[in-house]
Structures are given as structure tokens and as C-alpha cells.
Amino acid sequence: SHEVGAMKPDPAIYEHAIREHGLVPERTIYLDDVLANIEGGRQAGLKTVHFTGQSVEELESEFLALMTAS
């Protein structure tokens, strides 16, 4: 965040990560436990999973569903 001069959920953070890592937003899953951050990621075009204490199996199921969704 200090490199970008912004913090989540500021769109600049997500845009920086996408650009710096050559991410394809619609093919990138973003996991966070803070709903505001999830909304920021979603606005940046990322596929998002809001972590609320799900089991590994539940997270895996959510990830698989996102990866197979068009």
C-alpha cells in the first residue's frame, strides 16, 4: 500500500496488483475476510470469495465454481 499510496478497498490497490502481476481480472480469484475489500476487488473485475470461516472443502467448492463459471 505504501508503494501505491492507497489502501484497500481503494481501486488503485487492485489496479496496481493487476498491472504489476499481469493478472487477467476475470481469471483471478481474490479472497478476503473484509466485505468492503471484496466489493473493491469485485469492482476491479476480480472474481471474489468472502472468507467467513469456511472450511477448506467449502472454499475449494467456491473456487471450483468460480473457475468453471463463464
Image: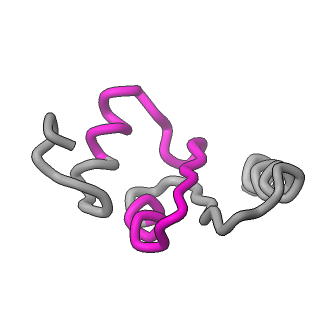
Residue 29: percent from left, percent from top: 60, 47
**Residue at point 22%, 51% (across, down):** 12
**Residue at point 29%, 46% (across, down):** 15
Residue closest to the far left: 5
Residue 25: percent from left, percent from top: 49, 46
Q: Nearer the viewer, residue 30 or 33?
A: 33
> Where 38 sits versus 59, above or below?
below
Q: Determine if the magenta segment contains residue 24.
A: yes
Dominant secondary structure, magenta: helix
Q: Determine if the magenta segment contains residue 41.
A: yes
Tell me how the rendering is colored: one colour
**Residue at point 73%, 54% (across, down):** 66
> Where 31 sits versus 50, above or below?
above
37 left or right, relative to 2? right
Residue 51: percent from left, percent from top: 63, 62
42 left or right, relative to 61? left
36 left or right, relative to 56? left
Q: Quadrant of the C terminus?
A: bottom right
How many marks can you see? 0
> Where 1 sits versus 20, above or below?
below
Q: Quadrant of the N terminus?
A: top left
Which span is picked out in magenta? 15-42
Residue 55: percent from left, percent from top: 82, 57
**Residue at point 82%, 50% (across, down):** 56
25 left or right, relative to 43? right
Residue closest to the far top: 21
